[in-house]
Image: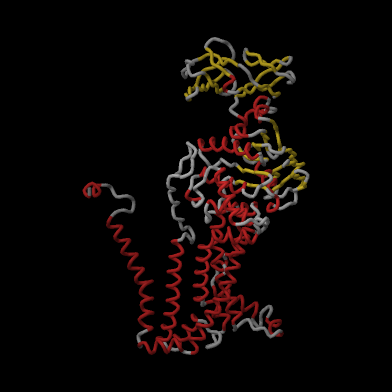
Amino acid sequence: MKIRLDNVVKTFDTFRAVHGVSLDIESGELVALLGPSGSGKTTILRMVAGLEYADSGKIHFGDIDATDIPVRDRGVGFVFQHYALFPHMTVAENVAFGMKVSKVKRGKQEIAARVAELLRLVRLDGLGKRFPSQISGGQRQRVALARALAVDPKVLLLDEPFGALDANVRRDLRRWLREIHDELGITTLFVTHDQEEALDLADRVVILKDGDIVQQGTPQEVCREPNSPFVMSFLGDANRLPATVVNGQAQVGTATLPAPGVADGKAEVFLRPGDLDWTVDGGGVAAKILRVIDHPGGRRLLVAPDQGDVLELDVAPETLARAGDTGFVAVRRGRVFAA
Amino acid sequence: MSASTARKPPRIGDNPAFRRALIAIVLVVTAFFVVAPLVVIGIEAFSKGWATYAAAITDADTRHAIYLTVVTALIAVPINTAFGIAAAWAITKFDFWGRRFLLIVIEIPFSISPIVAGVAYLFVYGLQGLFGHVLQAADIKILFALPGIVLASMFVTAPFVARELIPLMQAQGRDLEEAATSLGASGWRTFFSVTLPNIRWALLYGVVLCNARVMGEFGAVSVVSGNIRGQTNTMPLHIELLYHDYQSAGAFAVASILAVLAVVTLVAKVLLERRGAGRGAHRPALATPPPSAAPQFASEKTT
């Protein structure tokens, strides 16, 4: 089911949570709404679900105007951050709930069969008789997903689905959600503040800031072509250096970077830690090492350039570096934005 | 081992002398101020033997007082329960103007002296009061009759159920109801199969406390009921009346019934608290799940 948001606005008291947001989600797509807290991403999700009403604008499900359809009749599956499982019902009863209250009457056996099928899908067969308090967080979230899928929703909506889980479980569940999505082909919209999660999972990432969409595109597009300093720094660690642009070339120390489309004059260069390297005599930006942090995959250097803020760079594990050393930061690539 | 513990510096307040003294003081005070009066009620009630006790209990006026108290409770408790659920629901599930104010107003009967409530009702419904003439013209008797007693009792006990439910429902949030609705459940269905099961023990706890207070209420009721023996006397009022009539055995006999009701309430309360109701009561720790039967993700730990 294709979803279209058309200039949707939502204000809480005096706080404008969502400015006119327009967004198209293709049928079968898996889209991430990514943004810092207060960016309006959850509000948008709740408006799509019908848990909040839009102050103005339209929400279409396919050809139907769903703006005023209450959540009960909207046919969405909603997965809450804290699972919202019914604590007094077993796992199987939780999954069956939607079918029991549905206007479409189903027989007991039909419901039981569907519950078993769903529990198999979320790899929880055999746990149907447990109560939510007796299973782990990751299992609870999978029950919540099975419960949402039980009513054959047109759209699946997930609010920070993995936010309350620890890192390893989160990564596994993410990959698994992707598999389920590919298997069922259901249009899915999820909210996260974790850029890694969004990039890992989504076909398309919609980046929000202060109730507006700042950029949307495939993970590749937003990573390689961030359109603003905000997107650049929100998607990952980024260093910032002052630069001067002359004829489409930015000067950073002794290094030169292409700056297509940036007007001559003062500019800012954003550099990922991996875009930088450390050399003792290679030229670049002169700097002194403040600290070395070792990671399994390499070393991160915190260096103080002659002017400007501290830079962070990721270098190969065999790089020789010690706090107090002086040398140069080599710039491999970077993105230049007009200051 | 005992030698090593003896040599350990005592933790704060863990000095043996202090500990014993504190426990002793608490025990003595409890015995004198709480237990002794209850024992006295029991002893005095039976001081003139079973026959007097039975006579006091079966006296027509006493029976009427018991009847009136039970009827009052049967009317006031369900209404206040419904009110409490409605208020808790409104305050915790909706955002509206004046929500915080309502929260404070609901607590007023707790902080106000019941006699003030009684006098207030007198001013509103009494002959000299705001609606006095209208009511008299319509031949509706509120004061010095059952409606007045019920109204006064309801005022005093209005917060009990709501106060039990609000903290719990606030902690539970709106997620469960939203989840149920998004799955297609109607409002009633959501309430009865999702909200109610999760608040039932707290609700019952509130009802028990409310009932105990309705049956024992004296101040507000004594102002509005008019103390007419055999007509508008509830049990607490009847006890006072008997006492002033120098029928102390009778007074203690009726008091013993109220005391038994209180003890039953207390037992019910303790049982309910065990099930996790009550303010600040800890829910029993979540059971540790046995090793999972279902295939697990390698990294997923069942904790």
Q: Position of residue B78 (x, y in %)?
A: 57, 72
Give the vertical position of A207 relative to B248 (above or below).
above
Image quadrant in which you'd find residue B46: bottom left
Q: Nearer the viewer, residue A249 or A97?
A: A97
Q: In this image, B148 relative to B213: left or right? A: right
Outermost residue toward the front in this view: A109
Image quadrant in which you'd find residue A155: top right
Q: Nearer the viewer, residue A116 or B54?
A: A116
Image quadrant for the N terminus of chain A? top right
Image quadrant for the C terminus of chain A? top right
Outermost residue toward the top in this view: A281
Q: Nearer the viewer, residue A185 or A226?
A: A185
Q: In this image, B9 relative to A304: left or right? A: left
Q: Position of residue B38 (x, y in %)?
A: 38, 76
Q: In this image, B47 relative to B303: left or right? A: left
Q: Using the rendered image of the protein, determine whether residue B116 is visible from the camera's viewpoint.
A: no
Q: Using the rendered image of the protein, determine whether residue B189 is visible from the camera's viewpoint.
A: yes
Q: Position of residue B260 (x, y in %)?
A: 42, 76
Identify the residue shown where x is 47% and y is 83%. Answer: B240
Give the vertical position of B47 relative to B109 (above or below).
below
Image quadrant in which you'd find residue B222: bottom right
Give the vertical position of A294 relative to B43 (above or below).
above
Identify the residue shown where x is 54% and y is 35%. Answer: A171
Q: Position of residue B284 (x, y in %)?
A: 44, 55
Identify the residue shown where x is 72% and y is 15%. Answer: A246
What sort of colour scheme is used for the picture?
secondary structure
